[in-house]
Amino acid sequence: MKIYGLTGNIGSGKSTVAGMLREFGAFTVDADEVAREIVRPGEPALLEIVDCFGREVLCADGTLDRGALAERVFANEEDRKRLNGITHPKILERIKEKMSARSGEPIVFVEASLIDRGGGGLDELIDGLVVVTCPEELRERRVASRDGMSPEEIRRRMDSQMSEEEKASQADFLIKNSSGMENLHAQVHALFETLCAEEP
């Protein structure tokens, strides 16, 4: 099994790329989906988050109020680091479990906002990194339309992430999402064919 990271900053279109890869037959694991799984009621991560941030990050039904937590951690770097310290090891372990259950797959893509080739975390799992890039102005418009965030919220999210230039410099494969869906589809198909051809 070859494992490739799939990353890109908020609004870049990495989830669209993941969907196209599934269309071509690839198996993908969405780290954001895993992140939601590990904070469900009864999960150890949720208990640790409440211990760390208080019950004000819970909804009335006991589920995590993701909006309240996001507002807090994206406004405070230390809080964001504390949250990552709780969730990232558990996300990594759950991703490993999912891949182990599909060990017969020749190629797996792990879609995640944060994959740092500096070492540790998801970087320890992957054989190569695919980075999706997109002009900042277009990313801002997409996020505003998709998530209804204010310009200030969008800017905080963007500022909390590694710069697109730095991410692109770490890429083994680059997908440029700036010329429409047809062009994007063609790039993703070419990438998938290339990676499949490299498999023994």
Image (tube, rainbow, N blue to C red):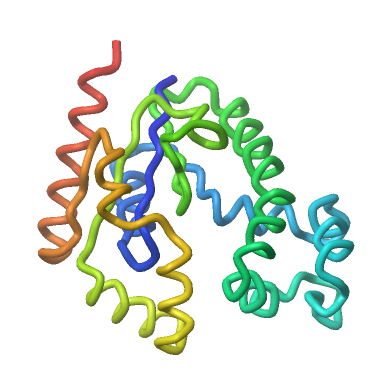
Above-or-below relation of 119 to 53? above
Q: Position of residue 91 (x, y in %)?
A: 65, 44
**Considering depth in this image, is 34 or 169 the residue closer to the camera?**
169
Residue 95 percent location from the top left of the image = 60, 38
Picture quadrant of residue 106: top left
Question: From the image, which quarter does the C terminus lie in?
Answer: top left
Residue 111 drawn above or below residue 27:
below
- Establish if 68 lies above or below 172: below
Q: Is residue 43 left or right of residue 76?
A: right
- Quadrant assignment, res 143: bottom left
Q: Nearer the viewer, residue 102 or 89?
A: 89
- State the residue in front, 11 or 168: 168
Query: In the image shown, does 14 or 20 lie closer to the viewer?
Result: 14
Count of numbered circles on the image: 0
Residue displayed at 59% across by 76% down: 75
Q: Position of residue 90 (x, y in %)?
A: 71, 43
Query: Residue lying farthest top?
Result: 200
In-image side of 26 versus 59 (left or right): left
Identity of the residue drawn at 30% across and 38% down: 170
Tell whether 139 sits left or right of 7: left
Tell me the quarter of the picture where residue 12 sits: bottom left
Q: Residue at x 38, y 44 (%)?
A: 6
Quarter of the picture containing the N terminus is top left
| Left-right relation of 123 to 77 | left
* Residue that appears at 68% across and 35% down: 93
